[in-house]
Amino acid sequence: MDASHSELEAIRRILADLMARVYRIERELRIRTESAAEPSTVEPTQPSPAKPVVDEVTSANSAPPVLPPPRIPPIATTPFKTEIDSDLESRIGSHWLNRIGIAAVLIVIYYFLKYAFDNSWIGPAGRVTIGLLAGIAVVVWSERFRAKGYKAFSYSLKAVGIGTLYLSVWAAFQVYSLIPSGPAFVMMLAVTSATAAMAWAQDAQLLAAFALTGGFSTPLLLSTGQNREVALFSYVILLDLATLFLVMFKPWRRLLVMSFAGTLLLYIGWYSSFYSRNQLGLTLTFATLFFAIFAIAPLVTLQPEGEAPLLASIPAVLAFANAGVYFLQAYVVIEEVDKTDMAWFALALAAVYIFLSRQVHIRRITPGASQILHFLHLAVALGFITVAIPIRLNAHWITIGWFVEAGILLWVADRIKSELLNVFALAALALGVVRLLLIDNFPTTQLIFNMRMATYTVAVIVLGAVAWYAARRTDEPGRTVAAVAVVALNALALIALSHEVADYYGRQITALMPARGHWTPADRNDWRGIEIERGFSYSALWMAYGAMLMVVGFLRRSAFVRWQALLLIAATIVKVFLYDVSQLDRGYRIVSFIVLGALLLAISFVYQRDWLQLSARRNKEGASSST
């Protein structure tokens, strides 16, 4: 009986717990449903029978109250994806469908007019008239959409109308020959001017781009295949000046890129078809005018606020491209006439860019861009100086010219404290060293006093100047440059002396070979003797240079120089023990070991006597580190 009673009590508790949970679930669902509907100030009526039952059950059984399940807040949906979808949808609906619709309308008009033309319903004059009227009508009609705020749709219609006007004039001149080239040019110029005026009045860069596109297309549309250099380039200069005027008062710097590209394409097209040497003066004059316009443009352009970095770099890119294009234009027409004139031309360009660099620095157009433009102009000027050297000079004189340029730039950089000039000085020096080691070939007939030794001497002097200027600095880059310059200086000096040794014995071998028609045992013995002397001379040279470095290191108290001496002496030791022992005769072998041993003992004695007080310095450093 007790067991059945306890089981019944357990069932009642479970039933009460389940009823309480169902009640709470129903109440939660009812509250959420009512909150989703219209807000009401009336409190929801609780079901009267349910509450007493639960209370009675829980009170009768003294069961702990069952906590309601935690309320899970509704998941907030982010509008990010929706915004992307709506933006893409708006762009497709307002832009792409607009353009596709315009294309569809133009295709329909094209097929209708073609059908009418093929069936001779409309004559040539009527066709041109329809095109002109249609173009004007579309442009006028587009203004209604612009007034209502549909600018993108309005510009699309204007592009259609303007293009129709250009094509109609082209058809009247090229296809039907209804008008001569003069009136056709005036009509196209009127269309270009009207489009530019609309761009100015409506402050629309896109319309200005339409005007430029039509303006540079006009010579192509009206081309007769004849050489009209003056008319063509005069017209292009007017377009470039008009573009320059626009960017002086409007922040439309992208137009400069279009104008530069259009000018370059027309120039290349004309040059490849009509240029001859007797036109050099006139062609170079026009090229110089083009260059002057685009060289001035970066100094007078108006920069818009908050411009993207890519667009902000337009003046610098244009300045660099303009310099390169103009130099190539001049090089093509001048170099085949006189290389000396081309070298002077490069130096004149360098002077121009130094002046422009100064002007940018003075004017300070914009805080960041002006500094970039200033350094770019200076870099271009130094580039032209570097290029002028190989144009004017030949063979090793090019190398000497680059070394001299590096020395001058180094001196100027130290005077005006310019890191950029230091970089260019090191670049010119690197060019000279690479050419000296890999390209230059010196046919020498005299020992020591020859052009190869003179060239290496200039290189060593400039490297010494680099090391001296860099050692005066206290920063880490200065010390690094000084160390590299000292190592390069010693390496070039040793290479130059080794070349002299090789040439000296090379001339002896050359003189030995033509003495007889074939090698005899005596000749082979002579050749062997020369080879032995050359090997010994290399060892002697390296030991002598190592000893000289060691002396300099002791006198200057420079551990860096002494380490170079030790490395060179180590290389000499390896050569003596591995090569001289097996290759040299007994006499030379003995002398090599005597000289090497004496040198090593002398250096060891100096270190043991501690003339540089290295041990005291180490003790001092150890004491300071322990404290």
Image (cartoon, rainbow, N blue to C red):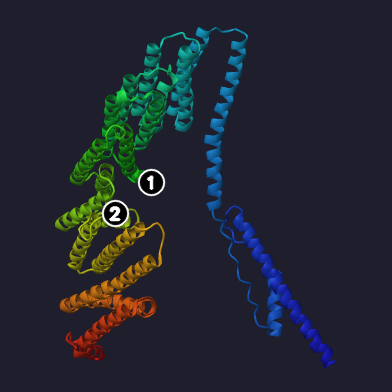
Q: On the image, which quarter does residue 423 sit in?
A: bottom left
Q: Which mark is residue 442?
A: 2
Q: CA distance from mark 2 to mark 1?
A: 49 Å
- Classify mark 2: helix, strand or loop: loop
In the rendered image, the quadrant that contains the N terminus is bottom right
Residue type at numbered disc 2: Phe
Q: Nearer the viewer, residue 292 or 521?
A: 521
- Residue 132 appears anywhere in the view: no
Q: Tell me residue 117's x, y (percent).
A: 59, 11
| Residue at x 23% of width, y 68% of height | 475
Circle 1 residues within 10 Å: few <14, some 14–19, many ≥20: few
Q: Tell me residue 370's x, y (percent).
A: 25, 47
- Residue 604 appears anywhere in the view: yes
Residue ID for mark 1: 310
| Residue at x 30% of width, y 27% of height | 242
Q: Nearer the viewer, residue 428 or 435?
A: 435
